[in-house]
Amino acid sequence: MADSWPIESLRMPDTPAEPKHALALRMREDGIVVRVWLFRGLVWDVRFPHVGVRSEPFYLLDLVSGEESISV
C-alpha cells in the first residue's frame, strides 16, 4: 500500500479552505481505509475491517463548478 493519498499532492500548507471534497480508498491486510477530505483541510480516516475491494478508487467534487472526478 502506498503511504501517500491522491489529494495530498493537491493540498498546500497554509492555503485557505477550498470548496472541494474528496474520498479515497486504500486496501490494508485487515480490510480497507476510506479517507474523507472536506474543504481539502479536514481529514478523517474511516476503517472497515474485514472488507475487501478490487481497486482503490478516488473521487473529487468541486462545489463551485459542480465538477466531479473519479479515478479507479
Image (cartoon, rainbow, N blue to C red):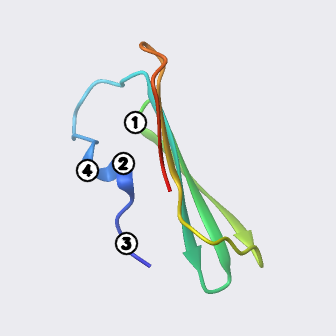
Q: Residue at x 38, y 74 (%)?
A: 2
* SS category of the residue bearing label 3: loop
Q: Residue at x 22, y 40 (%)?
A: 12
Q: Which mark is residue 3?
A: 3
Q: Is residue 20 above or below residue 70?
A: above
Q: In this view, does 10 lie above or below 30?
A: above
Q: How crowded is mark 4: few (under 14 residues within 10 Å), some or many (20 or more)?
A: few
Q: Which mark is residue 7?
A: 2
The quarter holding residue 33 reads: bottom right
In the image, residue 25 lies at what x, y percent? 56, 60
Q: Residues within 10 Å of mark 1 (few under 14, many from 20)?
A: many
- Left or right of 7 in this view: 36: right
Q: Residue 71 carries which label?
A: none
* Closer-to-camera residue (31/15): 31
Q: How far apart are marks 2 and 3 (CA)?
A: 12 Å
Q: How far apart are marks 1 and 3 (CA)?
A: 18 Å
Earlier residue among tags 4 and 3: 3
The residue identified by callout 4 is: 9
Q: How many marks?
A: 4
* Closer-to-camera residue (10/65): 65
Type of amino acid under label 3 = Asp
Discs 2, 1 touching: Cβ within 8 Å: yes
* SS category of the residue bearing label 1: loop
Q: How crowded is mark 2: few (under 14 residues within 10 Å), some or many (20 or more)?
A: some
Q: Which of marks 2 and 1 is in front?
A: 2
